[in-house]
Amino acid sequence: MARRRQAVTIKHVAADAGVSLQTVSRVINDEPNVRPEMKQRVQASIDKLGYVPSIAAQRMSGSRSYLILALNDRERTVADWRARAGTDWVDQMLLGGMLKCAEHGYRLLIELVDTHNDHVERELSAALAALRPDGVILTQPHSENPLIIGLLSKQGIPFVRIGSRGSGAGIVVQMDDERSARLATDHLLGRGHERIGLIAGPEEYGVSGWRIDGWRAAMAEAGVTTAGLLARGDFTFASGEKAARDLLGSPRRPTAIIASNDQMALATLKVARELGLDVPRDLSLISFDNTPTIRFTQPGLTAIDQPIAETVSKAVELIIAAQRGEDLPEQPVIVSGSLVERGSVSAPAG
Amino acid sequence: MARRRQAVTIKHVAADAGVSLQTVSRVINDEPNVRPEMKQRVQASIDKLGYVPSIAAQRMSGSRSYLILALNDRERTVADWRARAGTDWVDQMLLGGMLKCAEHGYRLLIELVDTHNDHVERELSAALAALRPDGVILTQPHSENPLIIGLLSKQGIPFVRIGSRGSGAGIVVQMDDERSARLATDHLLGRGHERIGLIAGPEEYGVSGWRIDGWRAAMAEAGVTTAGLLARGDFTFASGEKAARDLLGSPRRPTAIIASNDQMALATLKVARELGLDVPRDLSLISFDNTPTIRFTQPGLTAIDQPIAETVSKAVELIIAAQRGEDLPEQPVIVSGSLVERGSVSAPAG
DNA sequence: ATGAAAGCGCTAACAT
DNA sequence: ATGTTAGCGCTTTCAT
């Protein structure tokens, strides 16, 4: 196979415009010390020749790679894809991340890394060495992983931790799960519910705790006890089934349940049906995840919409800013979720 | 910010192992002319130092970029993501593509390009110039776009056209839509249906035609006419509604309908309900897309499962083979879909 | 404000 | 079988 060379390089442009490489480089990077007329002349040549700088070459000479890495948990991500259960977390990341990247000439590259693995550090180091990204976006549970955080800090690569509580290195962007949990709880309290159960996620995920906090706080403010109303799941359907059964089988049966993700909400719906409970007449239900599938249930589920796209978009912005040496927010950046009403909430049965 | 340099480079390894750069390079790339003991010594240094070659540098010196670009239609992809309607086409591409790439040290990068745009060529050229990918995967409708095909051929970049009919440059990988359409049609014929309607996709998509072909062929073989049984949609819910209404409002009302994608199948289900038709008692329904949402309808829809992950995985394999100068299949490569039975098909009512 | 020279990390081509 | 040399395309010094 013929060895492909860059068709039109900075040299061609320089020759065409009759200037030095350096001047062309200055124009490309929008640097000072170029007269407007010069700049215009060079730009004309660039347009004429359809020149686009090689990212590899730019990276080589110590500049940016225009690459941002989004690190996702391999096991869970692959499982979600295989299950085809409608989890669109990655799509929403791409939606927010790719479009924002494109605005600035960057690309977003998804990288799968295994958290439960001794090789995390090795895997990540390899990716960083190979790709030399300008920034890294950490999703849960990587955003809490001290090994990953340490490595990134040491290498001086700007990184955003999504959905992590403040402390530690890196820029933190949160979806304010606590507030969202309050939102859901208040919504139910407002309808007259008092026995509002929560199916929480696994402890490994920081968000699980914050959601519990939000729910507890809202309940406390309303002067209502949470005793016997908390169950744990691990985000799987099966775990949701078990948690729902525990909750709905208890003597103080809740009149409403908030499930920490869509699978567990779906499971709760199923269990309710099996127990002969009508949703929303006998049980109100809120899903903490506005994924595609929960709109197609009967009834459609009221849900907390997590602004994943917006959050990742924000993360990209912050990384690009960091990379440019701009000032960064000291405080965690917060992107708020919202409640989407559908048909799974009503007042508790008389 | 401190200028980041490659922490450990080929030089460090060479020094550590006491050999020349070239020998290290040979070991990295598994090239001949290195004595086993030498190779072992170098490998030991590589492991010890945790060395990973910089892809940018490899690319620069005329070797691979270890990047494969997957080109998707921007408008439709973004619309799907925004709609959050459960289309998991991109996820399945990532599932098949990323995992296969990872096996060979490659990465898959999604790139959105606008087909209905005069700038296709410019956009694509820019991406190619900037990224210099080792290969490109074209999805519909890009796989039929002569501008894109021409550009890629001219630049000598290996590319796979997914879901395109053979003719023209590039490697073709098909999901055999014609056969899948026959599969669906035969399934219905086998249940005793004769008036089997088809809601086809837009003409712009090659697959639309092949599905019609498959359906026609199966019907012809069964000695059944297709007159008045074909409707067109454009893959949207609204278009599906209209098509379903046309079909179900006709004097020769079909007892079964095959919808060319999930949205149109969902729309058909809705229209059937509105007309007081029970699925599957009064109308059998098959969706030509086994997406997440159609499992959660009542009843769950019988569907053709398109092996997207497998197809993209195959595409990656072929690109890597092409890139290595291996022989390529002359004939289109075919990955077959299958029928997933759920509850939306029964024998036609008496 | 512009240009020339040096080098980024790696591999292809050419020695030895 | 191994080492040496010369770039790849670009940006960073450092001149002018």
Image: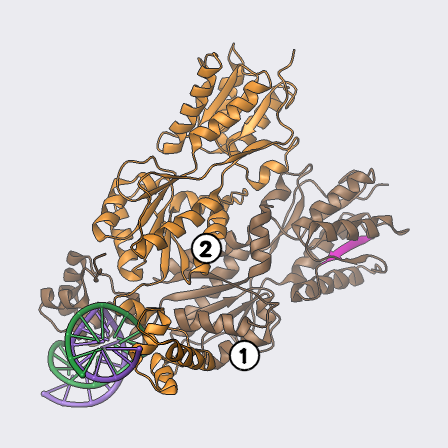
Chain colours: A brown, B orange, C green, D purple
x and y percentages locating residue A93 in the rendered image: 50, 56
Vertical position of residue A4 compared to residue B306: above or below: below
| Magenta stretch, overall SS | strand
Span colored in magenta: A195-200
Residue name at image x 67 percent, y 45 percent: A302
Residue ranking furthest to the right: A251
**Few, some or many residues within 10 Å of mark 1 (<14, 14–19, 20+):** some
- Queried whether the magenta region covers residue A210, the answer comes back as no
Q: Are marks 2 and 1 on the same chain?
A: no
Measure the C-alpha gap from mark 2 to mark 1. Answer: 30 Å
x and y percentages locating residue B165 in the rendered image: 34, 35
Residue name at image x 88 percent, y 51 percent: A250
Residue under pointer 2: B100
Residue name at image x 16 percent, y 58 percent: A49
Q: Quadrant of the C terminus of chain B?
A: top right
* Residue B68 placement, left or right of A96: left
Disc 1 residue type (three-letter): Gly
Q: How many marks?
A: 2
* Residue A110 placement, left or right of B341: left
Disc 2 residue type (three-letter): Lys
Q: Image quadrant of residue B190? A: top right
User: Secondary structure beneath disc 2?
Assistant: helix
x and y percentages locating residue A219 in the rendered image: 78, 60
Q: Chain of mark 1?
A: A
- Queried whether the magenta region covers residue A199, the answer comes back as yes
Residue name at image x 70 percent, y 45 percent: A266
Residue under pointer 1: A150
